[in-house]
Image (cartoon, rainbow, N blue to C red):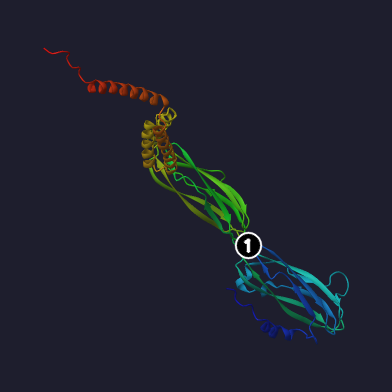
Amino acid sequence: MMKKALPLLLISVILLPLYGAADADPKVELTYPNETQPGRLINIDIKLTNTTSEMLWDLKAVIDPNDIPPDIKSYIRLVDADKAFVVGDGDHSINVQDQVSLRLSIETTSNAEAGTYKLPLKIKGEIGNCRQGCKPYLLMKDIEFKVIKDYPSLRIELSSYPNEVLQGQSIKVPFKVTNYGVGYGNNIKLSVPSNNNFITSLEVDSIGLLKSNESRNVNLSIAAKGDASTGNYKTDIIVEYFDPYGNKKATTESITFSIKDSSLVKDAEKYYAQGNEYFTKKNYSNALEEYQKAKIAYQGLGLTEKVNEIKARIELTQVAIEETKSNIPLSIYIIFGVLLCAVTMELGVLIGTLTRKPKSPKGGL
């Protein structure tokens, strides 16, 4: 992406004829971060040891704005880029084997592009062992670093929620917003569109800031209007935010649900209530009939949880009916025994009567 900076060799070829040359260059150590981000201050510490055999005079370190490559020039701001190694009163000389240091500062702009940046650094002054006749001196160094952009990445994760809502009632939709990126997400705003059939409301509509791997749990309420048309609906959770470099971003997650007719629910609830009343009175056959009606009504509404609840009541009622059949009251046994005895006695009399022989007449004619 970045164009190559003007080769130092070319600069040297142009400038060296104007400056004196030393028998050896001084030792220069540069210390600064190898990586940075847009909108950050970069401190460049320079330590110089005069390893030549001559004295250095009025030496300074300079980052010349004219030397900055054009393709990165708009992304660099020079804060403190021209400073002398020796300041104050005196001859500003650096003797052989003396060590001096200073700090320069630059700043990357907030809109700096990612890539490798190379800036020429000039160390210039004079060299020689006498004040008169000393020659100009120039040493070129590179300052090279990378601009890294850490972008946030926000994601919406839905938890389990009811997918049916009745006219005039509401459901809650819990969800979580998580930053899976490296940079922080700032000024985070949440919104969910409403329409003529339902109204949405959020527990919070602003989170503020999420750092990397941070999360925030939020509840959404969806209320169906009393006169809402029944059917299937869709809306979106919208999360808008800014990255650390001022760029606006957004992410969305869809929510689908159905609005059901509340009058049908009232019928289903009536059947269920009547079934419970019959069950309490131990009128199990009527209870079973009402439960069956309620189950069919809730199935038509698509309310699965309610259907499962009623199925459990139906099984309980069927067990109660079977138990009733096997537990005949004692009074029934007594009545049955009395009737059986009476029938047995009558049969005995009848049989005795039928088997008795008629008596023979006495005497003859």
Front residue of this view, candidates 116 and 201:
201
Q: Which percent across, then down, holds residue 215?
A: 60, 53
Q: Where is 358 relative to 294, above or below?
A: above
Q: Which percent across, then down, holds residue 148?
A: 63, 67
Residue bearing mark 1? 110
Label 1 Cα neighbours within 10 Å, binned few <14 / some 14-19 / many ≥20: some
Q: Using the rendered view, name the quadrant where residue 321 is placed.
A: top left
Q: Where is 66 relative to 334, above or below?
A: below
Q: In this view, does 364 lie to the left or right of 229?
A: left
Q: In this view, does 248 lie to the left or right of 68?
A: left
Q: How many dots with numbers?
A: 1
Residue at image location 40% in from the left, 34% down from the top? 326
Q: Using the rendered view, name the quadrant where residue 210 is placed.
A: bottom right
Residue, far right: 90
Quarter the C terminus occupies: top left
Front residue of this view, candidates 209 and 216:
216
Residue, far left: 365
Q: Which percent across, then down, holds residue 139?
A: 75, 80
Is residue 196 among what the camera can see?
no
Quarter the N terminus occupies: bottom right
Q: Which percent across, then down, holds residue 363?
A: 15, 13
Residue, far bottom: 23
Q: What element carries label 1?
A: loop
Is residue 187 among what the camera can see?
yes
Q: Where is 148 relative to 252, above or below?
A: below
Residue at image location 61% in from the left, 50% down from the top? 208
Q: Where is 72 relative to 240, above or below?
A: below
Kind of residue sitting beneath label 1: Ser
Residue at image location 63% in from the left, 62% down from the top? 110
